[in-house]
Image (cartoon, rainbow, N blue to C red):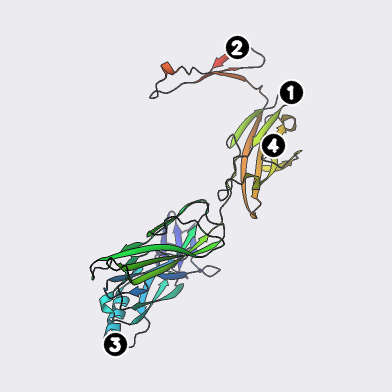
Amino acid sequence: FLLVPGNALTLIKSTIQAENNALEKNGDSAVVVSRASTNIDVSVVIVGETVIGTCGGVAELTANGEGSIAKPFTYAWSIVNNTGLDWEKSLDALAQQTTTSVLALNGSMIPLGANVTVAVSVKNWLNDSATAQFGLSKVGTVVPSLTLPSSSNITARRSRQTDINVQVRTPKCLPNLRVDAFWSQVTGPHAISITNTRSAYLRIPAFSLDVLATYQLRFVARAVSQQTNATLGQQSVDFYLKVENEDLEATIAGGSSRTIPVSGNAYDINFDASASIDPAYPLAASGLSFNWSLFQVVSSSLTPVSLSSSSGATLSLSTAQLSADSEYLMRVNVSTNRSQSITAVASQTIITTSLPAPRVTLGVNLDKRVQDPHKKLVLKGRAVRDDSTSGNDD
């Protein structure tokens, strides 16, 4: 079903009916679909070749509509600088017939020396729209044909490698041609180590980029005569890498829940959050800060319990601070010095019991002569109560 702003719907059990077909019965709930309280951001960028050479070919322009909600989009293409010439009319008719995100322009339809401005309008089902324009020209040189990624604006993460792949096709209208491709960095807070600069495929290793930084990279493909090594024509495209922030990963060793015996003499129990990391800077362990807090769970509410120390990656807690047969929640808040706004929280439930803690011994026979890697290895332990010399195997 399609939800239309301003229309009323009726919920009947597990189904939804339109207003004119709604059943009037007790218990039905009317739902009115209204516009969002804030504007829905919609944007569009056109990606494609800016130059068509004398060999012609097909230039594919891709409109990348972006918006967090209210998808899918509809696309409307047109030729902006349509002065009424026959070739412009033909191009405009082709553009208006295209309703997808990709517009394929045949280079043979464009005369030599002509400049073409293409426009696209994207609209979501809430009628929020955005427009973009893109210019390309027909030149009297031989240029390679390119198939570009879906967008020239690339969101990257420091903790992951970034790959950009451009497909390059050698012009077929002249013999003895080759294509030379290479990458270069235009802007950025520091130089990126690019090893495969003379390839259409670029891989940027993980941890090469700075968080929240923007880098501009340029790809150039040249049509070169194999006989004279002269460059006959070239295509270039710029890519913009925006490095997003990354959440911290907080964890407390021992899982989400632990059972702690608190009978007998008090002893210390340890909590360890040292496995928490900043994925963007995993080697900078000293850059993390830890803040511990303890709560007793009483009737689904949390009552704070004071701690003698609340900082550091590890924490020791005496069982003397815990009541038997109770539930507690240990929580650690992890932050990073590079940005105090980035935090992560891990929690561990503590169940205390008045039963004595068992003493456990574990024996393992690791005789290599009887080991079979294809069979399951069974480990047996023996748990013994403090007040007894007998126990049960488990």
Query: Marks 4 and 3: CB-CB under 8 Å?
Result: no
- Crowding at dot 1, Cα within 10 Å, few <14 / some 14-19 / many 20+, comes out as few
Category of crowding for the residue at label 2, using alpha-carbon neighbours closer than 10 angstroms: few (below 14), some (14–19), many (at least 20)? few
Distance (Cα) linking label 4 and label 1: 20 Å
Give above or below for 156 relative to 103: above
Quadrant housing the N terminus: bottom left
Answer yes or no: do the residues labelled 3 and 1 have beta carbons within 8 Å?
no
Badge 3 is on which residue?
Answer: 85
Precedes in sequence: disc 4 or disc 2? 4
Place residue 236 in its image quadrant. bottom left
| Position of 88 relative to 213 (above/below) | below
Instruction: Check disc 1 and report the residue beneath it.
Output: 265
The residue drawn where x is 37% and y is 60% is 200
Secondary structure beneath label 4: strand
Residue 115 at x, y = what percent?
35, 81
- Residue where numbered disc 2 is placed: 390
**Disc 4: which residue:** 315
Q: Is residue 87 above or below residue 6?
A: below
Q: Are marks 2 and 1 in contact (CB under 8 Å)?
A: no
Q: What's the residue type where badge 1 is placed?
A: Asn
